[in-house]
Image (cartoon, rainbow, N blue to C red):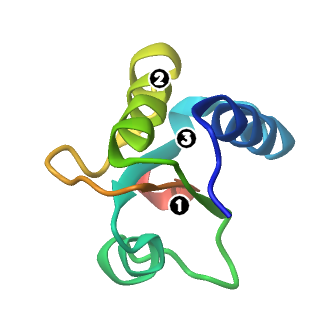
Amino acid sequence: MVYSVQQIKFEFASYVKEFGADFREWSVGVADDARKALFRENGVDEAGDVWLWKPALTPAAAAMVRSWLVDRHGVTNVSAEASGAEVFIFKRHCAEN
């Protein structure tokens, strides 16, 4: 299943609000393989950290979600040069803030 830009925005915003509502504590990226990007490339702990990913309709749709989170909400972009149709977010570790 893939999701529209609006569906992903809604789900990500709801998820962030569930875990404290401070978008600045989160990071966002796009990738061809969100699981790899989350757990290998960004060191997210699958069992212990807070994270979410969704497949978008296209890489352009994924980039739109990323831009919305970065530009409007101050989320840190961890994939400036990357492309892909999967969008992911994760809450940064307290030690990194």
Which image quadrant: the N terminus?
bottom right
Q: Looking at the image, is mark 2 or mark 1 nearer the viewer?
A: 2
Name the one closer to the observer, 67 or 26: 67
N-terminal label among 3 and 1: 3
Residue topped by disc 1: 93
Crowding at dot 1, Cα within 10 Å, few <14 / some 14-19 / many 20+, comes out as few
The percent coordinates of residue 3 (x first, y second) are 65, 48
Crowding at dot 3, Cα within 10 Å, few <14 / some 14-19 / many 20+, comes out as some
Height in image: 89 above or below 10? Answer: below
Q: Residue furthest right?
A: 18
The amino acid pointed to by label 1 is: His
Residue topped by disc 3: 25
The percent coordinates of residue 94 (x first, y second) are 55, 56
Crowding at dot 2, Cα within 10 Å, few <14 / some 14-19 / many 20+, comes out as some
Mark 2 and mark 1: Cα distance apart in space? 22 Å
Q: Looking at the image, is mark 2 or mark 3 nearer the viewer?
A: 2
Circle 2 SS class: helix
Mark 3 and mark 1: Cα distance apart in space? 8 Å
Mark 2 and mark 3: Cα distance apart in space? 16 Å
Height in image: 49 above or below 59? Answer: below
The residue at 69%/85% (across/down) is 47
The amino acid pointed to by label 3 is: Glu
The amino acid pointed to by label 2 is: Trp
Residue topped by disc 2: 68
